[in-house]
Structures are given as C-alpha cells and as structure tokens.
Image (spheres, rainbow, N blue to C red):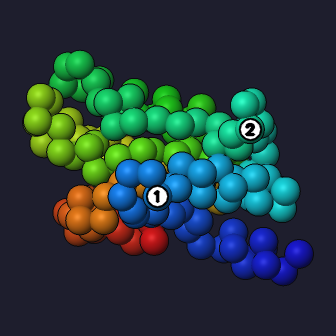
Amino acid sequence: MDAPKAFLEGFQNLILVGNPGSGKTEYANRLAQVFSALNIVCNVDTHEGSAVVREKVPTDFIGQYIGQTAPRTRALLLESTEKVLFIDEAYGITENEKKGEEYGQEAVNELVGYLSTHIGQLIVIAAGYEEEMMRFQVNNVGLARRMK
C-alpha cells in the first residue's frame, strides 16, 4: 500500500478539462471508485452507478446575501469529508455575473482554507472548459497550488 500512502501525503485534488460530452463526469466517477477501492475515501455512494457522492455546481456554493457564501461553502465541504466532491463548471464560482466577484472569491477562499487544513480528508475534482478552468486557477493562486 505504498502508492496510497504516497498519494495522501499531498493534495489529491484534480482539475479535469474538456468539451461537453468528453467524459469528465464519467472519469470523475471512475476515479472515485478507484479511490474508494483503495480506501483513500470512504462512504462512496454507488447509487445509480455514481461513485461521486457530492456532485455540485457553482451556484450551490454562492449565498443569496453577503456573508452567506462562506458558511454555505463550508457546509458543503463538511458534508463531503471523506468523500469525493465533483464541481462541474467550477469556473462559474468566480464568474457569477449575478452575484459579483466578491461572492465567488469568498467561496474560493473558504475552499482553499478547508483544503489546506483538511489534507487527505476530502478529494475535490473540479471540471470545466479548458480556457475557463485555466483562468479560474490563474486568478486564484492558492487554489492552483491545491489542485492539479
């Protein structure tokens, strides 16, 4: 079991890029099944063949009013502990035109803080179009270091 141990020593979070229909969600599900089989994550829900326990979109992280985004994001992360969290079109967290930049940045700050203090307790797989995901990482240096 050297590989899983080595795997757990750093950040396990991933970014998947590709066009619609390229299999990002399916790939994330397969990875989650592998992580579960290796006991890297537990409590994997295999309901309807999906091993990704928590599948979320950017609007799930953003609060309706100022000050609601961080607690909402933290709650989603806590619910996903020891699981795989798949965020489809993750770049939408910071590119939310209706709520403005500060809401998205608040969610990203919470995500970065959680990933920093809970290493090995959660795997985040963020997916989206290549250009948008590159911009998402470049604009959030702390996030870029925690997701590859």
Q: Amino acid at mark 2?
A: Gly
Horizontal arrangement in the rendering, residue 81 relative to residue 66 (left or right): right
The numbered disc on residue 54 is none
Residue beneath the point at 59% across and 32% down: 79
The x, y position of residue 36, in whole percent, is: 79, 53
In this view, 124 is above or below 49: below
Query: Toward which corner of the image does residue 140 lie, by quadrant?
Result: bottom left
Q: Residues within 10 Å of mark 2 (few under 14, many from 20)?
A: few
Q: Which residue is mark 2?
A: 49
Looking at the image, is mark 2 or mark 1 earlier in the sequence? 1
The answer to whether residue 137 of the structure is visible from this angle is: no
Give the amino acid type for the residue marked by disc 1 in the picture.
Ser
Label 1: which secondary element:
loop
Q: Is residue 13 left or right of residue 62?
A: right
Residue drawn at point x = 40 percent, y = 63 percent:
17
> Label 1: which residue?
22
